[in-house]
Structure formats: structure tokens, C-alpha cells
Amino acid sequence: MKRIQKHVTINYKMDTARHGAPYTMDNIHYFNHGELMEIIVKACLGYDAIKESNGRYDEIDDIADIHASVKSNRATLTSVQLGTSFDEIVNAYFKTAPTKTWIYAILDDDVCTMYIMNQSEFKAFLYRFGYYCKYRNVVRLKTDSKKMRLYLNIRARC
């Protein structure tokens, strides 16, 4: 696992009156937290700071050049129904996803910390900090916590 920290250079703001997709960069296009983090990570890594149209997880990566998927707190592994339990969904996801790299991103004020993981690292992270959401029948990541950050920072030093 590798950790990279970069200052965020794009301007965005949060509209607290909007639910679900409160972030904007131009007061026209609104994004949810995951979409905003994808844009920020792309900008921090030197790619165009744009949000590509949403595609199926098994057809397109968030950052195609490096076969990377961007995840952040409370992220959904995939919105596609892959099973009816945590293990079923995770196993089906890893069998079919073209992704080679996962980037878990945390935003603190104007600093983006990115943890870059391979499949085995992300799978271990998912088993530690993921959960099955019965209501939506998906696997999600928990909210960012001190325990999660400690876990990531220890593994990023190895």
C-alpha cells in the first residue's frame, strides 16, 4: 500500500440545502461525495478534473489509464446487485471487476490523502471496514474513523 498526500487545487463548495449531491464547482453540476472525491483524486494525480459519465463497475474504471477505482468513506462497492450477502457480493465483484488498483481517498480541509492498494490490500480493507447493507442489498464502506486511518497508515509504512 502506498500513501500520497496532495493539496487540493480545485475550487468546490458545498450547498447544505441540497441532499444527496451537495457539492459543486460551477453552481450548475452537482456531485455526491464519491463523485467529488473522484474529481479531486484525478486532479491530485495530474488527470483532468472531470467526472466521467457513470458506467458499470465491470466495464469502466474511474481512472482508466491506471485501471483504478476511487473509493471514499461510506462508498458503495458497486450498485449492481451481485448477491445477497457480504461474501457473495465481494467475491462476485473481484471476479468481474477489471480494476487493478483501488484508491481510498480522505479529504481534510485542502489536503487529499490517497491510499493506493492492490486487490489483496483492498479486499483486506473491505473485510475490515465494509458491511452489508440489507436495505439496498450492497456492500458499503464504513464512515471514516481514527481506527480506519490508523489501519491505513500502518500498512502504508510497510
Image (tube, rainbow, N blue to C red):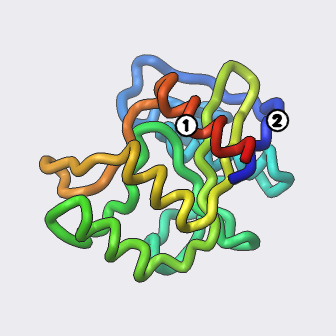
Q: Residue at x 42, y 81 (%)?
A: 96
Q: Where is residue 32 shown, x and y percent of the image?
A: 47, 40
Is 125 positioned to the left or the right of 13 in the image? left
Secondary structure beneath dot 2 equals strand
148 is higher (above) or lower (below) than 46: above
Q: Residue at x 63, y 53 (%)?
A: 103
Which of these two is toward me, 72 or 157? 157
Task: Residue 81: give its label.
Answer: none
Q: Residue at x 62, y 24 (%)?
A: 13
Which of these two is toward me, 150 or 46? 150
Is 111 positioned to the left or the right of 151 in the image? right
Q: Residues within 10 Å of mark 1 (few under 14, many from 20)?
A: some
Q: Where is residue 37 shown, x and y percent of the image?
A: 60, 42
Q: Quadrant of residue 88?
A: bottom left
Identified by mark 2, the residue type is Lys
Query: Of the residues tagged 2 and 1, which is closer to the observer?
Result: 1
Secondary structure beneath dot 1 equals helix
What is the spatial separation of the Cα atoms under label 2 and label 1, in whole angstroms?
Answer: 20 Å
Which of these two is toward me, 132 or 32? 132
Is 114 positioned to the left or the right of 18 in the image? right
83 is higher (above) or lower (below) than 116: below
Q: Which residue is mark 2?
A: 6
Q: Where is residue 139 shown, x and y percent of the image?
A: 30, 54
Task: Residue 151: give its label.
Answer: 1
The mark that comes first in sequence, 2 or 1, is 2
37 is higher (above) or lower (below) than 137: above
Is 61 positioned to the left or the right of 133 in the image? right
Identified by mark 1, the residue type is Tyr
Q: Residue at x 39, y 57 (%)?
A: 77
